[in-house]
Amino acid sequence: METKVLKPTKENIRYCAELIKSGDVVGMPTETVYGLAANAYDESAVKKIFMAKKRPADNPLIVHIADIGMLKELTTSIPKIAITVCEKFWPGPLTVVLPKSDKIPLITSGGLDTVGIRLPSNKVARELIKECGLPLAAPSANLSGSPSPTTAEHVFDDLNGSIPAILDGGSCSIGVESTVISFENDIIRLLRPGRISVDDLKTVASDVIIDKGVLEIISNDAKVKSPGMKYKHYSPKADITLVDGSIEFFENYVSERNSIDTYALIFDDDNTSEDIKSIKYGNNSEQQAERIFAVLREADKIGAKRVFARCPSKDGIGLAVYNRMLRASGFKVVKEGD
Ligand code: AMP
Ligand code: MG
């Protein structure tokens, strides 16, 4: 199958909506990462997403809507706190997990009786959803396990030949996937960190609990609240090690292990010895979020076999970058002083 990369004109959005309405899948830009979209109600269309991505069947998809009114038919009950949260953070990079209605097939929810729902702010995504008149199931548009796509080219690199079209909306402005939360009375449970931070959530909840799966290894056969968090994920082919400490510790650590196909993933302001080849990924957490997946893909393109990465900050959106880096490295972390 030929994979068309299309500018997001009205005509092309309409063309992609027709593809989706007839049961096909389409790559679409969002403000977080690119999604692979299909009619959330259509079992065989959703099956195509799992097949194209080679995604495990128990990893649920997020359902994308274009206005808050679409929430009702997807869920059986919406607690008051969920309404407050959605009104405050939507449209935007936040997914809420709620009890699912019978309209959502189990294949979409990965077999769970809940569904993750998000109203994106990206204009192209919303126009596409509106044009379809349907909620769109859309996980990240990468091959399962590899770094998420933040450009149409990344989607093409992973899925060329297995999907009919990609809408090219340019680079994603945020760069890491949405924050995923569930509700326990007035308390919010953070299942996956993203641009909407713990501090942001604390403004609307009596407390925010960080789920174990955010920072710890979850075994592949464990039952977890956010199934996507249990897989080694976001990984390039290169072997990644996170080095948590000062630049001096980092430089010594890498120097002792340096070889021809070793690279350092460092901050823009870091200066390391000329013997160490480096890739830079921003100075602050926002820049790191925006670039993290592109630099992990770049590491493969330049043939890196081993990458030593400076550990990002764990505050704000930094927690999301750290969470993705933990998984990209398979939780291989070296700490100064250990
Ligand atoms: P992706 O679309 O690739 O960003 O992955 C979606 C992720 O959202 C999943 O891997 C889960 O971690 C989370 N998610 C989606 N739906 C649910 C749900 N019903 N319950 C818990 N987590 C969910
Ligand atoms: Mg994903």
Image (tube, rainbow, N blue to C red):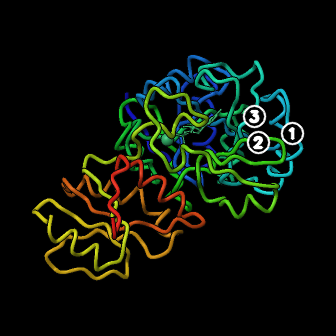
Give the mark, 2 or 1, whose residue is nearer the N terminus. 1
- Pair 3/2: label in front: 2
Kind of residue sitting beneath label 1:
Pro
Who's the residue at 64% across and 26% down the image?
A: 21
Q: Residues within 10 Å of mark 3 (few under 14, many from 20)?
A: many
Give the mark, 3 or 2, whose residue is nearer the N terminus. 3
Count of numbered circles on the image: 3
Q: Quadrant of residue 130?
A: top right
Who's the residue at 20% across and 56% down the image?
A: 304
Q: Is residue 316 left or right of residue 6?
A: right
Q: Quadrant of residue 89?
A: bottom right
Q: What residue did someone put label 1 on?
A: 79
Q: What residue did someone put label 3 on?
A: 98
Q: Alpha-carbon distance for marks 3 and 2?
A: 8 Å
Give the mark, 1 or 3, whose residue is nearer the N terminus. 1
Q: Residues within 10 Å of mark 2 (few under 14, many from 20)?
A: some
Q: What residue did someone put label 2 on?
A: 183
Query: Where, quadrant-wise, is the N terminus in this rendering?
Result: top left
Where is residue 263? Give x, y as percent. Answer: 22, 64
Q: Residues within 10 Å of mark 1 (few under 14, many from 20)?
A: few
Where is residue 286? Give x, y as percent. Answer: 54, 69
State yes or no: Cβ of the residue under disc 3 lies below 8 Å from any atom of ligand 1: no
Kind of residue sitting beneath label 3:
Leu
Are the residues at dot 3 and dot 2 in contact (C-beta closer than 8 Å)? yes
